[in-house]
Amino acid sequence: MITIIAAIANNNALGKDNDLIWHLPADLKRFKKVTSGHHILMGRNTFESIGKPLPNRTSVIITRNNDYFKDGCFIANSIEEALEIAKEDTDIFIIGGAQIYKQAIEKGLVDRLDITVVHHEFEADVFFPEIDMNVWKEASRENFMADAKNKYDYSFVSYVRK
């Protein structure tokens, strides 16, 4: 199973200046729970925004730079190469960024979208691709209200390929 996991705003905003725009501890907790023990595939900018390999996960960084190296990570020059590295894993997660999401969706490489929708619009410089409801169907949704720790209303939404 190859899953894109992302947190996006109502206007599909992903981030600005290579960083997250909001802080939702519930989303971070869920991300950690869902991806732990698995391969996480990401572009170089996404890795550099995180700054280090995440614990209890196998990091695969996708970059066109053949000289790129990060201790504790695998390096791939394409999404296909990254998937080949992770092929023994039953659950592979693509965690960003926008270009990697777009390529994976356009190439039909993804089985599921695991999306946290932040019910707010933000100014951003990177956006998640439009989810084509001719290709995807909503499989589940959990809605949550803002609280003392989470500033915005949000939903965990899973889509599966039709």
Image: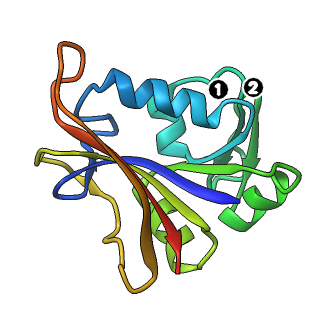
Q: Residue furthest top?
A: 148
Q: Is residue 137 left or right of residue 161?
A: left
Query: Residue at 30% across / 44% down in the picture?
Result: 155
The vertical placement of 49 against 133, above or below, is above
Seen at 52% across and 24% down, the residue is: 51
The amino acid type of the residue labelled 2 equals Asp
Q: Is residue 44 above or below residue 36?
A: below
132, 153: nearer the viewer: 153
Percent coordinates x, y for residue 115 in the rendering: 40, 51
Q: Identify the disc placed on residue 71.
A: 2
Quarter of the picture holding the N terminus: bottom right
Disc 1/disc 2 C-alpha distance (Å): 8 Å
Residue at image mark 1: 53
Around disc 1, counting alpha carbons within 10 Å, would you say few (fewer than 14), some (14 to 19), or many (20 or more)? some
Give the mark toward the camera: 1 or 2: 1
Q: Of the two numbered discs 1 and 2 on the same chain, state the one appearing first in sequence.
A: 1
Q: Is residue 17 left or right of residue 57?
A: left
Residue 31 coordinates in the image, percent (x, y): 50, 33
Residue 118 placement, left or right of 19: left
Question: 88 above or below 130?
Answer: above
Q: Which mark is residue 64?
A: none
Q: Amino acid at mark 1?
A: Pro
Disc 1, disc 2: CB below 8 Å?
Answer: yes
Picture coordinates of residue 35 (x, y %)? 62, 36
The scheme the figure's colours follow is rainbow
Question: Could you say whether the residue bearing mark 2 is in a helix, strand or loop?
Answer: loop
